[in-house]
Image (spheres, rainbow, N blue to C red):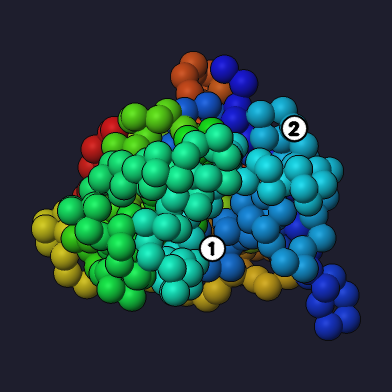
Amino acid sequence: AAPTLRLRNLTVSFAGQDAPVTAVDDLSLDVDAGEVLAVVGESGSGKTTTFLSALGLQRGAHVTGQALLNGQDLLSASEAELSRLRGREVSVIFQDALASLNPVMAVGAQVAEAVAVHHRDLSRARTREKAVELLELVGIPAPRERAAQYPHELSGGMRQRVMIAIAIANEPRLIVADEPTTALDVTIQAQVIDVLRRIHERTDSSIVFITHDLGVVAGIADRVAVLYGGKLAELGTTEDVFYNASHPYTAGLLACLPRVDSGGRGSRLHQIDGTPPRDITSVSGCVFHPRCPMARLPSPCSTVPPPLIDTVAESGMTGEPHLSSCHFAAEVPQRADVSAPEHP
Ligand code: SF4
């Protein structure tokens, strides 16, 4: 099947003090029909900017390249065309439900409003009924009573479920979930992910799950894209990325996960020193080299930008592509005790 979203040579920059600052650099990536793609990286890695820019939702961004949603280029679409597509073909779930919901409108009415945008033919009673059905679908207990409540009367987890109900109101082909569980505690996080997984099974929408936490994607994602410095560091199936990490940055993120023998609790063992560069074009060679424990300096790591290669094809094997942009992809150390991803 054709990919739902196809990003080609996407470059995003913002006006800087003296010169423009590049946040995403020549990124190409497909979101396949019906898949859950996790997009992982620290804050500043470009993960949110990439998708919000592709959907025309990133303020102040200068965007070039292509972002094809079901074949239609979003970057050349008019604002009217984009608003027609949003909600119907693509919707976004933001991290902060409280800021995204209208504080003075009952949540049922907000879900009903989302339904009505693309179903003007439905009666008001039917629209309200559909809103209650959606609240039930996302696991809100006593949905009819809850529908009459205001956002501040609900817990963070319940508000995030309302956001999901709004996002799926029109069964869009693509749902972009931007750190949807970050503000929630671990148990509620798991519940919200479970809701997303059930929705995915039911609707077969493609889901882009943006997160800084590799740990939360194991149980939901088919594939994982690791972004660093506005570029793809690694892309592969969830299992390949967890068990055969092919970029030192991914290995660093994996090393930050709690140990299996701590029962998933315990302190973070490790952190990657430093932060992503603000202007990625200011770094020569490999954009990760200033922080990379494996870097060979100066050459090739600070002189030659590593190309994105398919490590599977490169080693003469067949199978799902496993892309890495590291000169030494085959030498990346593996972490043996990482939590096993439960494949969906
Ligand atoms: Fe590290 Fe060099 Fe690989 Fe970049 S190319 S990730 S600096 S080893």
Q: SS class of the residue under badge 1?
A: loop
Dot 2 surroundings within 10 Å: few (below 14), some, or many (20 or more)? few
**On the image, numbered disc 2 is attached to which residue?**
72
- Which image quadrant for residue 267? bottom left
Is the C-beta separation of discs 2 and 1 under 8 Å? no
Which residue is most to the bottom?
17
Q: Name the spot of residue 321 as percent of width and height, x first.
A: 53, 27
Looking at the rendered structure, the kind of residue marked 2 is: Gln
Q: Nearer the viewer, residue 211 or 244?
A: 211
State whether label 1 is within 8 Å of ligand 1: yes
Q: Nearer the viewer, residue 282 or 331?
A: 282
Q: Name the spot of residue 94 as percent of width and height, x first.
A: 48, 60
Query: Is residue 147 among the parts visible in the rendering?
Result: yes
Which badge, 2 or 1, comes first in the chain's sequence? 2
Residue depicted at 23% across the width and 42% down the height: 340
Q: Name the spot of residue 11 as percent of width and height, x first.
A: 77, 53
Residue depicted at 50% across the width and 52% down the height: 113
Dot 1 surroundings within 10 Å: few (below 14), some, or many (20 or more)? some
Q: Nearer the viewer, residue 294 or 190?
A: 190
Marker count (numbered): 2
Give the CA separation, mark 2 to mark 1: 38 Å
Q: Name the spot of residue 174 as percent of width and height, x first.
A: 54, 38
Reply above or below: 334 against 150. above
Q: Which mark is residue 292?
A: 1
Quadrant the C terminus occupies = top left
Which residue is most to the right?
18
Reply above or below: 221 against 144. above
